[in-house]
Amino acid sequence: MPILRLRLLGHMAIDDPNGIVSLPRSRKTRAILAILALATPRPVMRLTLTGLLWSQRQNEQARASLRQAVHELQDTLGADYASLLQAERHHLTLRGEGLAVDVLSLAQITAPRPETLRTFQQILLEDLGGLDPAFDRWLTDERSRLVRASVALGERILSEQTDPADIIKAAEQLLLTEQGHEGAWRAIIRCHLEAGDRHLARQVYERCRAALAGRGQALPSAETEDLMNRVAPPPLPRRILTGEDAAVAPAQVAPPSGGRQGVRLGILPLRVVDPYQTQRSDGLAQGLAVGLTEEITTSMARFRWISCVSGSSLAAISGDARPGALPWEAIGVDFVLDGTLQSSVSQMRLLMRIIDMRAGGEVMWARRFDREVSDILALQDELAAELVAQIDPELLIREGERDRPRRQAGTTAMSGNDMVLRAVPAIYRLERGGFHAAGQLLEDALLADPDNPSAHAWYAYWHLFLVGQGWTQDPAAAARRGAALAERAVTLDPGDARALTLAGHVRGYLGKRPREAAALHDRAIALNPNLALAWCFSGLSLTYLGEHEDALIRVRQASRMSPSDPHSFFFDMAMTLPYLLRGEDEKAVEFGRRAVELNPGFSSSFKLYLSALGHLGRDSEAAEVRRRLLDLERGFSIADAIARAPLTQSEDIARYAEGLRRAGLPEVNTSKTDDPD
């Protein structure tokens, strides 16, 4: 008998070498198969199965439903695998030498490697939730049991590593299973300390704090804090430095330039301005200011390229944590985030700004947030999420447009990270000349730093636009390169939320594997729920799968979090697609028009906009949009649109293509171009 391989991790599947067996049609029958597989070779009482899957039915109805499900399961297994299922009067058993269950192989691993753990980081029976309250409770327990077993395996793998690179790799894999595992965090910190990179150790510590805070643990353990005492630089004297002291101070506190992975952001405590404070006895405004400052610091620490320095740390180093105090240069902070909180009895106003310390204290960004005061904790979470989601892209663009050679005194060389940052604004703008120059920068970044995960992720994303814009004569080769870069980015740093979501979008769009993309986006959101781009990409992957209502919810979340994002045109395009496929063409036209106004160089917006106009029969407007689309992609056709579309539902592809047809787009590309890539 050939081996029947049952996959319960992720979406349930059966791998049969003969291609004969398929999954049962009924989800409850699939659940029975899963329950029996996890129990194998032990029998499972029929009463247990009815209690898990028909807990709200009468006994006789539940037993009849179970009998029907067993018949369906027997039909699914067929003659080749019928012997695996043993149906007795009071119990059912799934067993035999021809059965292999992916979850059960966890206990059989004899020589695991760090990458071994990846297999078991998928969600158990991801597509079987919501069948019955009793089954959901059982599923929760089984998932917890799997996590515990995976953590034990991860701890074993970590304990067997001796090389620092392998230790970090094993620890990162363990953290993907258990984000709050302080032993793994300490292992990474210790490796960086032993390598002499205190700045990178500090970054990992801030990530640890953020992960623990997300799990409700206020502070790391005493053991972790003791380890971090080796990282903290000696404090400067609490006075303004002059003469020789000032000359040597930067070397005492600033991180080594070679260890810099991004920018250092100082986060100052919020200042309270409350004319009504005398009418209160609860100190509400002051408490909100303290809590919001901590929440912002914790949330910002989730962005891997940003190293956060809290106001208390700044005060300990410099003796003063005000924006105008000295010595900011000595501390090595690139930007400072500060703000004021004003409140009345029922209203609150938050004024925030970012100060660029390397531009002489220039205010580069400012926002005002007005809210009603009701649930303080919910308000704190909402404000921090919205604020942090807006700060990240602002800093990305600012760093990308900064003059890199002047940034590093005494040298004109750019690091791999500097090249990546410089490429980002050109990717956002999508101007063809600048876009290709950005591609060369990213290629150079990989040559300078072959193991840089950000360089791989952004270069993969660049290839996505290269194909989507029709700017390559060999889209298949570009798609393969983009997919390979994306996979490498995830391998290099599976804990980087931005790299995960960029790689996920490449996998979903270029690789046409939206289900895998959705899993990567979910992981990215779990790592950093304030990354607006991940919410947008997650929504797109759901649209590709035909889940349009859930897609709209996720893309709206991205727009709500970061309404002025440099990627706003992309958010509007992402809203256009599900509205178009749901038949809400007026809405699709509204968002399509906004998307092309925000970025007239992004061809995907024109395609969806044009399809919606075709369905509405707006011929004159469609003719103008078609002309602008063909100016961007000469010769683009319905055949091209279908070939590139990552949509999985035939009715969605048909509706998209029919709208383009009605709008007058040609069926096939009859033009030839010798434009350079």
Image (spheres, rainbow, N blue to C red):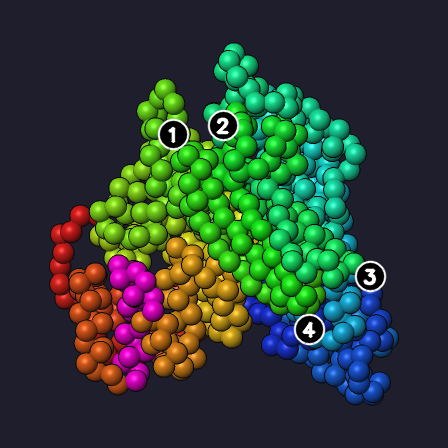
Say which residue label 3 marks.
42
Q: Which mark is residue 407?
A: 1
Residue 32, how many percent across, how many down?
72, 71
Task: Kindly report the distance in space between the C-alpha atoms of the residues bearing marks 4 and 1.
Answer: 54 Å
Q: For residue 610: magenta?
A: yes
Camera-nearest label, 3 or 1: 1
Q: Earlier in the sequence, mark 1 or mark 2?
A: 2
Q: Residues within 10 Å of mark 4 (few under 14, many from 20)?
A: few
Q: Residue at x 69, y 24 (%)?
A: 230
Residue 377, quarter of picture: bottom right
Q: Residues within 10 Å of mark 1 (few under 14, many from 20)?
A: few
Residue positioned most to the top: 244
Toward the viewer: 483 or 393? 393
Camera-nearest label, 3 or 2: 2
Toward the viewer: 156 or 29? 156
Q: Secondary structure at mark 4?
A: loop
What residue range appears in magenta? Answer: 594-616
Q: Residue at x 32, y 62 (%)?
A: 598
Task: Kindly report the distance in space between the C-alpha atoms of the residues bearing marks 3 and 4.
Answer: 26 Å
Camera-nearest label, 4 or 1: 1
Residue 670, how many percent across, how many down?
14, 66
